[in-house]
Amino acid sequence: MSGPTMAYICGAMQSLFDTSGESEALAAGAVLLRGRALPLATTLLAAIEQIAARAPFRRMTTPGGFEMSVAMTNCGQAGWLTDRKGYRYDAVDPQTGQPWPPMPAAFLALAREAAAETGYAGFVPDACLINRYEPGARLSLHQDRDEADYGHPIVSVSLGLPATFQFGGLKRSDQPRRVALGHGDIVVWGGPSRLFHHGVLGLKDGLHPSTGRHRFNLTLRQAL
Ligand code: SIN
Ligand code: FE2
């Protein structure tokens, strides 16, 4: 067999087995791009390591006085913070007294492309929160609302161990749907779902070939 028939079968097989092109609507304005970050995963993880060498992962304290189970750092013009004084963005890392490390070009390009694919052309993130989960770490339902302009979407990139993402609605009491997020998956939400509650269930123990016992998540925002 050769020629057009072979080409047809190869094309069909590719779409059967290559899941990296799939996209799934989660809500109005919210899309899951399955495996979209896979080609860049090694680059992203190396960049995270370099950022963490200058701005170490740390477990922050909520305004209510609880230490978060997720360890965090940031890169970009502004970094997201929480402490006893509240939630906010700041250009300076309070732990080092230095500006947050610059946003790597790969973060910027990936976020811009994922946002454009989802219908948010012209997205230029200036802040990236980097979350590191270890087994048991979780993030309770919350809204991302410390940004200046909700007209911009949120782009979230998952790396390493799989997790169960919760994606709810405008009200905290809206029953969230559960979405399995794995290595290389990207979720984009904006427009009507920009302020939807979301969270991550306790990370199950495991060993990922690229990240060991960790999950990393990048949330890229236009915050300022
Ligand atoms: C977040 O809401 O900041 C992180 C979400 C995730 O880790 O998937
Ligand atoms: Fe969030």
Image: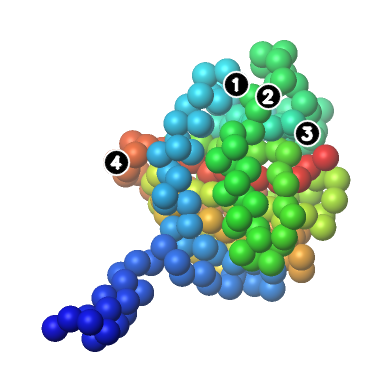
Task: Tell me the crowding category of disc 1: few under 14, some 14 to 19, or many 20 or more residues within 10 angstroms, Cα based.
Answer: many
The Cα atoms of the two marked residues, 4 and 2, are separated by 28 Å
* Residue most extreme to the front: 3
Task: Say which of 91 and 207 sits in front.
Answer: 91
User: Does the CB distance between marks 4 and 3 fall below 8 Å?
Assistant: no
214 left or right of 99 in image: left
**Dot 2 lies on which element?**
loop
The structure residue drawn at horizontal position 74% and vertical position 31%, both measured from the top left corner, is: 77
> Which image quarter: residue 198?
bottom right
The residue pinned by badge 3 equals: 89
157 vs 59: above or below: below
**Dot 1 lies on which element?**
loop
Task: Tell me the crowding category of disc 2: few under 14, some 14 to 19, or many 20 or more residues within 10 angstroms, Cα based.
Answer: many
The earlier-in-sequence mark between 4 and 2 is 2
185 vs 44: above or below: below
152 left or right of 105 in image: right
**Dot 4 lies on which element?**
loop
User: Does the CB distance between marks 3 and 1 fall below 8 Å?
Assistant: no
The earlier-in-sequence mark between 3 and 2 is 3
The Cα atoms of the two marked residues, 3 and 1, are separated by 15 Å
User: Does the CB distance between marks 2 and 1 fall below 8 Å?
Assistant: yes
The Cα atoms of the two marked residues, 4 and 1, are separated by 24 Å
Callout 1, which amino acid? Ala
44 left or right of 195 in image: left
The residue pinned by badge 2 equals: 100
